[in-house]
Image (cartoon, rainbow, N blue to C red):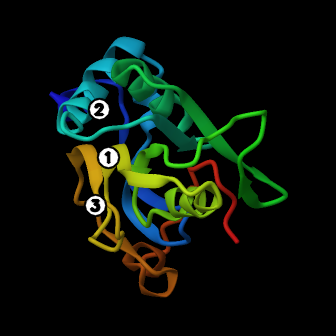
Amino acid sequence: MVIEHLKKSEALLEGHFLLSSGRHSNGYCQCAKLLQYPDKAAAVLSVVVEKLQNTQIDIVVGPAMGGIIVAYELGRQLGVPAIFTERDEGKMTLRRGFEIQKGHRVLITEDVVTTGKSSLETIEVLKQYDVEIKGIACIANRSTGNIDYPIFEAIKLEIESWEPENCPLCKQGIPYVKPGSRAIK
């Protein structure tokens, strides 16, 4: 069901992509294409909610941009508040009067997890509040076991990626596009 929703919403792309991590890839999951349809987003994220059945969550936090809508929908389905972190002068921060209480059980939310950079930056921000990170929830999990938190995904995607110097698409002279929202540094 998840893959069908991703395909029907044209969220699965093929080509040459520069990822937010700086890596290159021959595929990209543009979850914004799926998230523009609230009914499809609700159906896909219900798969994640099912996996979270035995996990107590007090609040969900999504890093901007990719995690905001996912946080909202998961918060709605779980019946808990949904907030987000965002970059201020390049640094992830909690703003807009959002509050987290000491001891809160927090679920981090993303659209796609590859390296986990945005999620891990959000976790660093939240550590000052002495919370319990219960894991990372996402639509698509592209990670390769490099993240030390449980990941609750709607779908696991196996899409190749390479360091720029090892990218076979670059070696073929195929130009890349950068579809993500985060600037590369």
Near mark 1 (Cα within 10 A), the count class, few <14, some 14-19 or many ≥20, is many
**Based on the displayed image, in which of its 4 quarters is residue 10 positioned?**
top left
Q: Which mark is residue 9?
A: none
In the rendered structure, find residue 140 and report the number of the disc placed on it.
1
Residue at 48% from the left image edge and 37% from the top image edge: 60
* SS at circle 3: loop
Q: Residue furthest right?
A: 89
Residue 112 against residue 89 in the figure, above or below: above
Q: Position of residue 133 (x, y in %)?
A: 43, 54
Q: Amino acid at mark 1?
A: Ala
* Amino acid of disc 3: Ile
- Circle 2/circle 1 CB separation < 8 Å: yes
State the residue at coordinates (51%, 53%). Answer: 131
Residue 183: where, in percent of width, then height? 69, 59
Residue 168 horizontal side relative to residue 81, left or right: left
Tag 1's secondary structure? Answer: strand
Amino acid at dot 2: Leu
N-terminal-most mark, 3 or 2:
2
Q: Residue 181 in the image: x percent, y percent?
A: 63, 48
CA gap between label 3 and label 1 equals: 11 Å
Give me the residue at 57% from left, 50% from top: 180
Q: Which residue is mark 3?
A: 159
- Is the residue marked by circle 2 packed among few (<14), some (14-19), or many (20+) residues within 10 Å? many
Which residue is identified by label 2? 6
Question: Nearer the viewer's eye, disc 2 or disc 1?
Answer: 1
State the image quarter where residue 79 is shown: top left
Secondary structure of the residue carrying numbered label 2: helix
